Structure formats: C-alpha cells, structure tokens
Image (cartoon, grey):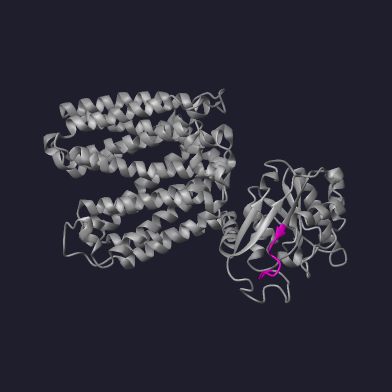
Amino acid sequence: MADRNQFRLLGERRFAPFFVTQFLGVLNDNVYKNALVILVAFHATSLTTLPPEVLVNLAGALFILPFFLFSATAGQLADKYDKAAIMRLVKLFEIAIMTIGAIGFARGSLALLLAALFLMGLHSTVFGPVKYAILPQTLKEEELVGGNALVETGTSLAILAGTIAGGLLVAAASGPTLLVPVATIGLAVAGYAASRFVPGVRPPTPELRVNWNPFTETWANFQFTRRNRTVFLSILGVSWFWFYGAMFLTQFPVYARTWLGGGESVVTLLLTVFSVGIGIGSLLCERMSGHKVEIGLVPFGAIGLSIFAFDLFFATPDPAAAQGLAVLEYLRAPGALRVLIDLFLIALFGGFFIVPLYALIQSRSDRSHQSRIIAGNNILNSAFIVAAALIAAGFLQLGATVPQLFLLTGLVNVAVAAFIFTLVPEFLMRFLAWLLIHAVYRIEQSGLEHVPEEGAALVVCNHVSFVDAVVIMGVCRRPIRFVMDHNIFKVPVLNFIFRTAGAIPIAGRKDDPEMMERAFAAVAQALRDGQLVGIFPEGRITHSGEIQPFRPGIARILAATPVPVVPMALRGLWGSFFSRKDAPAMTRPFRRGVWSRIGLAVAPPVAAELATPEALQAQVSELRGGWR
C-alpha cells in the first residue's frame, strides 16, 4: 500500500504545485487579516474615530461579503475556463491586492487597508471553486480522500500559522508598516510562482454562457444542487461543520481568559491543538477509509463531535481567579490536560466528518456543474459562519456562558446528524458496515483493482457467515447489490444495512416462487442499469467450512444478461461469531476474540461465456486456498 500513500501526492506535479499555491493563499489571507484586526484592536485611535469593536466586526464582514456576492460567478468561470489559468490570474490579482495593502500600512489609511481586505475575500471567493473542483479532474477516485485530507490539513495549519504570524508581525519592533507588507507581498509572489507549475485541465463546459447576475445565478445553482439529494445534504453537512467550528473558534479568546485564566499564549495553544487535531483527523481518513470515499466515517465523526463537546462542558473549571497565565503555568493547573484532550478530539473527529463529505460532493456531482455546486457550497458555508456569530452573540447577550454554548452546540449537532442520516440512510449504513470491518475484524485485501470501476458485472463469492455481504460492501469502492436469502435479509441491524444498500431478497422455489422470480427480474434490471450485483452461488451458508456446489442460478442470470463475472473468496470467517461452526451462528460471542484476521481475495473478471458454475467454483476455491 506504500505506493498509494497520500503523501506521495506531494511529490507529483499534478498535485504538489496546486497544494503549495492554495496553502500560500490561505496563509496570506490569515497573515493580512489577523495583522489588520490586531492593528485595529490596539491602534484604532490612530486610524479612525470608530470604536475597535465596530472595526473588528466590520473587517470580518468585509472579508466574507464577497463569498455571498461573487461565488456564483466564480463557479461559472471555473466550469468554463482552465482552472490552472484561473489560479495564475488570481495569484497575480493577489500581488496587486497586497500592494494596495502595503500602501495602506505605509500611509496609515484605513480605507485602503479595508479595501485590500475586501479584495482578499474576493480572491478567496474566486479561488474556492477552483480549489475543490480541480481535485476530481487531477486525482483518481481512490486518491480523492487522501487529496482532500492533505488540502484540509494544509488549510488548517495555514490558518494557524497565518494567525500567529500576523500577530507577531504587528507586535514586532519595526512595526507593521514594513514587516506586514514585505511578508504578504512575498507570499503572494511565491503563490504565483507555484501556480505557474500547476498543469492545465480541460474545462468541463467551455460552451457555458456566464450569467453575471449573482442573485439569479446563485438561485439557479441551489436549484441544481438540490436535484441530487445526497450531494445537497452533504453540502449542508459541510456548512454545519463550519458553523460548529466557528462556534468554538470565535469563543477561544474569552474562554481562555475567563475560564482558563490564560493570556494570549494560551489562546494560541488552544488554536494550535484544534488545528493539529483537524489535520491529524483529516490525514487518518485515508487509512481508515481504505483509499475510497468512505462516508461511513461521517457518522463516526458526528458522534465524536458531540461526545467531546459534552465532556468539554463538564471539564471546564469555574471562572478562574488567576489571569494572564502563560502556557506552562496553565498546563500545571488542575484539569488543563482534559480540556486540551477534549479540544483535540473534537477537532480530530471533525476531520473524520469533513473530509469524506468533501470527497463525496466531488465524486457524485455532475462534472459539468461541479465548480458551480462547490460555489454554492461556499455560499452556504459563509452563511452558516455568519449565523454562528449572530447566534453566539445572541445567546451570550441573554446570559449564557461560553461552556454552555459549547454544550448547546454539541446537543444541536446530535439533532443535525440525526436529520441528515435519516434523510440519507446510506451514511448510517456505511458506518455500520465500516464499524463491523474495523472494530470486529482486521481484513487483508488483494485484487480489489479487478472490481470494475464502472459498468455492469456479477460478483460471486463463497458463503461463510451472516456478514459476508457486509464485509464485501465495506471494502469495495463501488456499491454492490447483493442477492441474499430472505431469512438473512431479515436479521435485525443487518436488515437496515441490506435494505439501504438495495439488497435483493430471494427464496427457494418451494418456499416462495413469486419472490424468487421477482429476485431474478430485479437482478436482470440492475445489470441492465450498469450496476454491480453480488450473489452467493452456494445458496446457503456453509455448515462445514467447505465450499458447497455452485447452483445453476448463475447460468440463468448470465443467459438473461451476459456480463463479466468477478470471482471473490472470503477467508478466515469460518469459526467467527457470525459463522455456523460447532453451534448456531451468533450464539457464542468472542469465539475468536476481538479484531480477528480475515481476508478477501479477488480475481480478474471472467467473460460471461466462460463463467459456468463449475469453473467459477473451482476459481473461488483456488482463491480461498486452505484458509477457511
């Protein structure tokens, strides 16, 4: 698996220059924005008569305003033109913006400083659809999770580094007049240099006529996005994550000062822990998902977001008597480590939540509208961030405390997650399948590349246990509709997984001939629709651990719809809790302990005319070998 490690992308031209370009852009955004905010907060009187609180909020509003006004236009441009060319133009624009900002610092002109901030928001607005829509054009599907993980990690670390650097540059002895402009212009030039190496990509809809009216185009984007319910709800999930993150991050200064007794260095510590947590969680997604878009991680992330928000509420001490503690002093305080661990785990599970959602949006969006869908996502993200600020301010004004705000956010997260997973049960189904594979078993895989990426095919496998279909669904990138005995289909919990995955229940001719005929008709239709269909040709779970004769149902299926057949073999499940070795299945827990080793081997597809029951049985037996 080493050659598929996500970090190898950082050494390839199709990804590395883009990664550096977007990293430097986010870094520059935050260096400039935080330098300006700190300058306004502490030196407002030398710039204007407006109070610092008003100026800080005005700055935040100016930066986010372009996302509402220009995202729809940016999405159209990214679908119509080469995204690499747009990147280079945006980076040239960034150099010009930072030059305006430099003049503003030199002259002490608040108008120029705020104008540059607004234009940096515009820069990020145009870059956003390009940033996420270029990934599915340059990466393979199995690389999407790793690519998104690197982008999210780079983004969170760039935000942290830019926030810290902006403050340090303003506080430096030579002051912001020199250091901030030098740093921001330097970063803009470096970003443009990196963008020169981004390979060009073919625009998906070059014939598109740009609608320059942002309001009608925004509405059109939302209407199109809503056609695919899974994508639309994934966008809502991403926006909810930004809401959740904003509710926490914006409270850190007050939380650190009032409840933890810390000074500015403790605020930086909280930001660092949170950023590193998101980065590590994002990077772990690739390994945990098996190099595929594994949406089963999303419910897992949602659970952690709530559990550790609750624990953070209970871990928070009473308002601190001490004030201005440095990092080392705070770390010696009772309960300090628990607070930091909670924040780290909230961010870690946030990475599990956000990366698969981005990958899902990219993989299931219509390619011709992909950038516009991502632009719509950016608009919703911005709206949720603004809503988080307003709601937080409202609750705090009503007398709520910051820890109570954290608790409330965790509670609402439960409701939001339940809403999304109820409307799209595929999330929960994949979570249950993922949990079984990773919490109960250690699975060794070989030959998964033989499963066709597209088009119809019939998957055949030996039948060892009640969870055979779940195991195969848990490791294959493409959905598989399994034909299974109607009694297994009815097993509690497993029934939810099977129904959601579109499994086809079947009965014997003697038991229910009508159900059998409906099953064969459903299989034929699924194959005509280009889907993967899985069957267990033995017809029942083995009682001996040996492969039973394959029944002639295979021949009937292939006679109606000749498609390639992919042989698979499950290994190591005989003797597990879900098998029938020495006792009825699911009656003797922990027969083989926890996290026992199993395997799945896959052979190249067999042409329909060669796929006789006898030939397939021999091949599956050879794949399984002596490991039952």
Q: Which of the two residues, 124 or 463, is positioned nearer the viewer here?
A: 463
Left or right: where does residue 521 sit relative to residue 449?
A: right
**Is residue 574 in the magenta section?**
yes
**Is residue 59 in the magenta section?**
no
Residue in view at x 40 percent, y 50 percent: 278
Residue in view at x 26 percent, y 59 percent: 398
Q: Which of the two residues, 82 or 276, is positioned nearer the viewer here?
A: 276
**The furthest residue to the front:** 626
Left or right: where does residue 193 sit relative to residue 62?
A: right
Query: Can the viewer see residue 317?
Result: yes
Query: Can the viewer see residue 364?
Result: no
Image coords of residue 328 (percent x, y) = 22, 58
**Position of the C terminus by quadrant:** bottom right
Magenta stretch in the rendered image = 570-578
Q: Which of the two residues, 563 or 530, is positioned nearer the viewer here?
A: 563
**Chief secondary structure of the magenta span?**
loop
Image coords of residue 135 (percent x, y) = 52, 36
Left or right: where does residue 228 sit relative to residue 466?
A: left
Q: Is residue 276 above or below residue 414?
A: above
Image coords of residue 603 (percent x, y) = 74, 48
